[in-house]
Amino acid sequence: MTGQLWGVGLGPGDPELVTVKAARLIGAADVIAFHSARHGRSIARSVAAPYLRDGQIEEHLVYPLTTETTDHPGGYQGAMDDFYAECAARLAAHLDAGRDVVVLAEGDPLFYGSYMHMHKRLADRYPCEVVPGVTSVSAAAAVLGRPLCERDEVLTVLPGTLPPDVLAERLRNTDAAAVMKLGRTFANVREAFELAGRADEAWYVERATTATQRTAPLTDVDPDDVPYFSLALLPSPINNTHTAPAVTAAVEGSVTVVGLGPAGPEWMTPEVRAAIAGADDLIGYGPYVDRLPDRARQRKHGSDNRVESERAAFALDLARKGSRVVVVSSGDPGVFAMASAVTEVASEPEYADIAVQVLPGMTAAQAVASRVGAPLGHDFCVLSLSDRLKPWEVIAQRLSAAAAADLAIAIYNPASKTRTWQVAATRDLLLAHRSADTPVVVGRDVGGTRETVTVTTLGELDPATVDMRCLLLIGSSQTRTVARPAGPLVFTPRRYPG
């Protein structure tokens, strides 16, 4: 009877990440085989050392070359093919003698591992089983604490030996990526990330899970200090908090006004995420700025919600000194937010040379509407009930005009701690033009952890249930509510009678 061949994955480096099955097989094997370069130090053997026993035969398989040139007639590949054939013959002799052989492999045996060359030469001749191990990609994500992929995202694993332009094209067209085989390829790999416009999204991980592990943003790494056992990781863009600067942003001295969307990072556009990552200074209402990750190279400037003009001037003054400034708003910056304040101040002659850009975001009206269907499916208007910047008389006049025009209405800033009567007044104004059974949607904290969406009618709207965290959608005369098992569906048909 011949012996059994085992390809055993050891995981990324921490001996405690060796699987129970791998540890058992290592301790039971007659022969332990492992690879190393000519220096003789084997990472695989050092990881397996706690599980070895006295009396085992060790087959040390030393590569004839790594990156050196060779005079072999078949070149590098010819030399390696001869080496693998010799190794396979050495292991076959043990198997023929009835000895069980474990071939050690860092990470997973069939994931860029040396074991696969033995597998291809021996698995069809001897009983063979592969024991999977934790890959370096999984380990890198774990030590960074950053998800690799989420939902329908695509993870691409790439060798760093690809030409920079080929690698860049692959990086442009994937959600997340891991680039293996760094070492001497690191400069080309970093160039590829830069060509793809994703360098500031990427992380560098060296010797993950070991005592000498190191992590850093990819752009901070010295190319002369990168070992082979390292990789570049492009984590899930949904959760990634280290993203690339917008390619359209000015190199310095600019102001970009962005919308964060109504809630978490999944509501933020890639364009906005990139602009934030490329900023030197982040400015905005305190709670909005707090939603952004802290980065050592960035400065955050949170302020009260009632100093919009002062905030805009501060941003423009910083830009005039050469800073790349991002002014953040919740939702869309052009809807009752900072885009208007910044552009108004930027129109003054002293700021004429400062580049100003506005990047859109998902606004709360669309977010709330999406939760129930399409209440804003036809003509609609957007109004704010805040009387801080305009008198109530103007608000009331506009509400009445919108109601008389039979427009659906999205109402922002309906109430606050000091404004408690406007919602009831709005309801009464609208009832002069709309029936009491007009659909009303009350959305609170949509996209957040305390999201609630209530469908009611204009006649039954309770002002006491509405606060500053809410947005109201008031239907037109054509808006309909349809009861369904999963919850009501509200829509305004695109056709209008007559």
Image (cartoon, grey):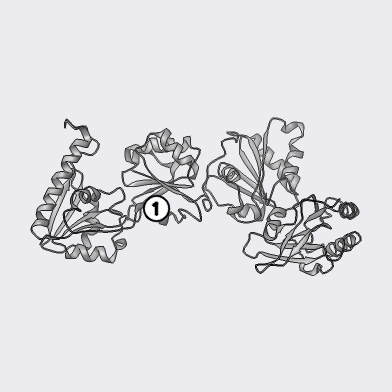
| Position in image of residue 379 (x %, y %) | 79, 49
Q: Residue at x 16, y 42 (%)?
A: 83
* Quarter of the image with the N terminus in it: bottom left
Q: Quadrant of residue 71?
A: top left
Secondary structure beneath dot 1 equals helix
| Position in image of residue 389 (x %, y %) | 83, 50
Q: Residue at x 75, y 63 (%)?
A: 481
Query: Does residue 250 appear left or right of residue 404 in this picture?
Result: left
| Identity, as a three-letter code, of the amino acid under mark 1 | Ala
Compared with residue 250, is residue 204 higher up or lower down, i.e. above or below? below
Say which of 191 and 131 sits in front: 131
Query: Does residue 331 appear left or right of residue 113 in this picture?
Result: right
Q: How many marks?
A: 1
Mark 1, Cα crowd under 10 Å, few <14 / some 14-19 / many 20+, is: many
Q: Quadrant of residue 80?
A: top left
Does residue 477 appear in this view?
Answer: yes
Q: Residue at x 60, y 56 (%)?
A: 264
Query: Does residue 267 appear left or right of residue 57 in this picture?
Result: right
- On the image, numbered disc 1 is attached to which residue? 140
Q: Quadrant of residue 346?
A: top right
Does residue 304 appear in this view?
Answer: no
Determine the residue located farthest toward the front in the rendered image. Answer: 498
| Position in image of residue 386 (x %, y %) | 81, 55
Say which of 55 and 76 sits in front: 76
Determine the residue located farthest toward the left in the rendered image. Answer: 97
Q: Residue at x 77, y 55 (%)?
A: 492
| Position in image of residue 245 (x %, y %) | 55, 40
